[in-house]
Structures are given as C-alpha cells and as structure tokens.
Image (spheres, rainbow, N blue to C red):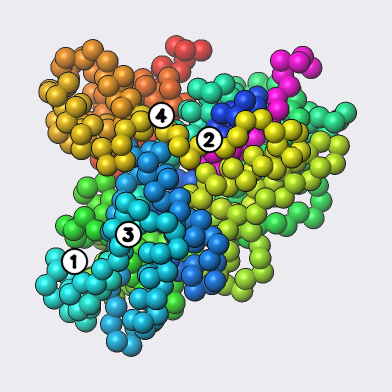
Amino acid sequence: MSEQAIFDVFVIGGGINGCGIARDAAGRGYSVALAEMNDFASGTSSGSTKLIHGGLRYLEYYEFRLVREALMEREVLWAMAPHVIWPMRFVLPFHKGGPRPAWLIRLGLFLYDHIGGRKRLPATSTLDLTRDPAGVPLKRLFSKAFEYSDGWVDDARLVVLNARDAADRGARIMARTRVVSARRASGRWTIEIEDVTTGARETLGARMLVNAAGPWVDRILSEAVGKKDVRNVRLVQGSHIVLTKKFDDTRAYFFQNPDGRIMFAIPYQNDFTLIGTTDHDFAGNPADVRISDAEIDYLCAAASEYFKDPVTRDDIVWTYSAVRPLYDDGASKAQEATRDYVLRVENGDAPLLNVFGGKLTTYRRLAESALDQIGEAIGAKGGKWTAGSHLPGGDFPAKGYEDEVEKLKSRYPFLAASHVRRLVRLYGRLAAQLLGNAASEADLGRYFGADLYAAEVDWLIGREWALGAEDVLWRRTKLGLKFSRAQIAELEEYIRAAANAAA
C-alpha cells in the first residue's frame, strides 16, 4: 500500500452525517475519503419531512438539550445555505378537548421562542381562524391556532452540497462505492472498497474510520468490521404522502392526532402538499422500505380530521418512505425513541468512531462533535469553522433569495420566471455558472421535460455525481413529479450515454 493511499479519516456513508463530517474534516486540513454504496442521500437523508426545526414535540420527552441545539442551528444553517433552506411559518390549530390543552401548547411555544437564541425568525402569534386565511381549508371546529417559526430544507441537496464542498476542499468523495471489509493492522485501517458499477476493487488505508452508515451502521460493524452481536440502533420507519395541492397558503400546518402523534401538512414544490410522517418500528433491509396500506390509511384519516375536504387515496401523486436509525435507548414506543445523536469511539489498534441517530437540523453540530473525537484520537487539526461558512452557491445574504432571482432573471431574460426561481433554489449563485453564456433556450441543449435541459443535466453529472434519471429527478431536483415515463426513459438514455463517453 503506497503512502498516497493512506488517509487521516475514512468515512463510510454518504448521508447528511457522513458528508457533514467529511466536509468539516477536509476544511480543517485532514486528508479525507468517503464511500457511499449508493447515491448520496439515497436513504434516510432524502426521506425526511424536509424541515430545519427544533422539534416542538421533543419537549414532551424532556429532550431540552436536543431542542435547544436544534433551535440554535436553524438560523446558522439558513445563513449557510439560503438557497436550499428558508423560513416557514407553521399553523398549529387547537380546540377544546384536543390531545393537548392550549396552556401546554402555549408553554411549549414560549420555550421554543426563547431557549434557542432566535434573532431573525418571527415569534409565535395567535390566530383567529375564522378570519385568517389559514382557517379556510380547515373544519369549522378549529377556530383558534398558534403560528410559529421553523425552517424548510431541500434535504437531498443539503447532502450533495456538503459532499461537493468536501471534494472542493480536497476530500476523495466516492459514490456507488461499497466497503467490502475494514480491518485493523499495525495501527491503521486497511479498507477494501468496490465500485458497484464496474466491480473494480481497491485497497486504501486510514488512520481513523468513521462509521456513519445510518440504517446500515450495525451491518457495517458486523459484516465489514467483523464484530459479533451488534445491536446499537432502533430502525423506525417514517412514510409520507404527496397530494395534489390541498391549500393555497404558503404556511404549513402542524396537526395533533388523537393517538398523541403529530403530523405536518406542508406546501411542496408549488403545486403539491406533503403530509407526514408515521413512526413505527421496522425490521428488514432498509433498502426495501415502502409505505404500507396501513400508513396510507393512517395519514389520510389523520389529515381528514382537520381538512374540510377529506384526503383520499385518489389525491396521492407520490409516496416515499425511509428508515430512521435511532439510537436504541429502550423507549417503549417508536415515536418516543430519542432523536438525539450518540457518538461512540473504539480506540483499539486503530480508532473507530460510530455515529448513531441524529437529525438533519443538528448535522453540523454532530460533525463538530465528531471532529472533537477525531482530534482526540489522531491529533487535532484546525478549529471549528463551519458556523460562518457557506455551502456551494449559498454565498449571499440569508434574506437575499429574491435579489438573486432578479439578478439571474436580468442576466438570462429568455428564461421563464418559474425556471429562474427553481435554478436559484437549487444552485444559488452557481446557477449563472451552470447557464454559462447561454443567450436562448436553444443554447441550453437538449430539452427533456418540465424545464430541464441538457446544460443542467451535464452539470449534475459533472459536478454532483448523478449517474441516472432517479438521481436527477428525485434527489438533485424534484422534477420527477412532472415527468412522464417516456421522458424519464429518454433522460436515462442520455445520462447512460454521457457516462459511457466519459469512461
């Protein structure tokens, strides 16, 4: 094994935690490699409710540290990536005899407003739903509501932007690369990896191994590292349904279900409504997770308790499910299991850091905590730096999205307004690099459907590791909801031809 093949840190897992750790480590000067067996954010990190939030319901379980840290992160992340993260107001309807009394909700929201260092986000207010537009789609039973602040995130893009920034800072980032084995030898890790596309294998070395494989974290320990009787995580399935647009308001709804669970109804991609999530234990291969009929019925029935117009299966245009790898704290119910993260270091002949749990909102803080552990194990390099940083394309003011839209619209007047807004939402200031010297739609190359052209697809292949239509339509963009099967097949053929040409 050559010295060039020895990394300071080798990260397994290309979800938000793995990519966040790789970015932070590379920015501090460590040599870093990351292997993801599928596409980035292809599991848990693209199956979220897509919120940057403190987790109001976690206050019921006395998770005060987690809620406070998450609340503090909302504005940090918004400033770091204002193209893919933005504020959203949430309407929480309540009525006498509901699952939680008004005084308890008010107390929770008071804590929510005051324990997290809120500066730019507006405070909680009270709504009269008989007069406020937020009451229009709801049943008359709901005449009052609280309105509070949290944030929205394009989850899969948050992941790939962290991966891109890590690569720009010198990390070796490998998608579709499986870790076959990881063994300690002579104070180092010897790691065999396999390109799942070609079958080619390679052996690398690392001073420290980070296991951030999400739902597969225990499987990595048992199958790759060779440990026995590994049981660290509790797998909990969460499913969502996407409907034809259920309401016109730009605000989201926070619904309380009679069983004590909560649910969100959120404006999604301008033309749709996202409803979720469920919480129940999952057994099996996380790659095979699918929404069940029972979950569909539950979400439809729960939403129908609030909306005047019932939610039915006929409204559903798409569903998605993911498995949350929660640290197994022995909680009796899936919804009660902690969402906090747990980091465990095994020193041995070469150090191993295992990452359990976590949530999108706290990924940056998790990465900082991981780097503290890495520094203790193999020597510190650099200091904390990500809080004041920007993800690629996000180097503009937190409230500057509309200004960026106007700038891009002025530079490329031939683009439809909706197209400009989408490009700024996905790529921020890098949208101009993507478009280059284009002076007309014809200059953007082949047209595939919706407002997707070859210029954008080529960018995603060359800069963001896209290797298939699914990568482009469901993770890098959300245009899959607007593509026909024939258009998907045409895009797949184009990407395959581009990959063959590159090879």
- Mark 1 vs mark 4, foreground winner is 4
Q: How many marks?
A: 4
Residue at image point 37% right, 44% down: 78
Q: Are discs 1 and 4 less than 8 Å apart at CB?
A: no
Please tell me which of labels 3 and 2 falls first in the chain: 3
The span shown in magenta is 1-21
Task: Provide the residue designation for mark 3.
Answer: 149
In this picture, residue 222 sits left or right of residue 324: right
In this picture, residue 434 sits left or right of residue 351: left
Regarding mark 1 in the picture, which secondary structure is present there?
helix
Q: Amino acid at mark 4?
A: Pro
On the image, the x and y values in percent for residue 85 come to 35, 44
On the image, the x and y values in percent for residue 239 come to 44, 58
Please tell me which of labels 2 and 1 falls first in the chain: 1
Disc 4 packing (10 Å; few <14; some 14–19; many ≥20): many
- Mark 3 vs mark 1, foreground winner is 3
Q: Amino acid at mark 2?
A: Trp
In this picture, residue 48 sits left or right of residue 425: right
Position above or below: 315 against 467: below
Q: Residue 196: within the magenta? A: no
Position above or below: 375 against 60: above
Distance Cα–Cα, label 3 vs label 1: 15 Å
- Residue closest to the far bottom: 97
Task: Provide the residue designation for mark 4.
Answer: 392
Q: Residue 12: within the magenta? A: yes
Whether residue 434 is visible, yes or no, is yes
Task: Provide the residue designation for mark 2.
Answer: 385
Q: Which label sits on residue 134?
A: 1
Q: Are discs 4 and 2 less than 8 Å apart at CB?
A: no
Regarding mark 3 in the picture, which secondary structure is present there?
strand
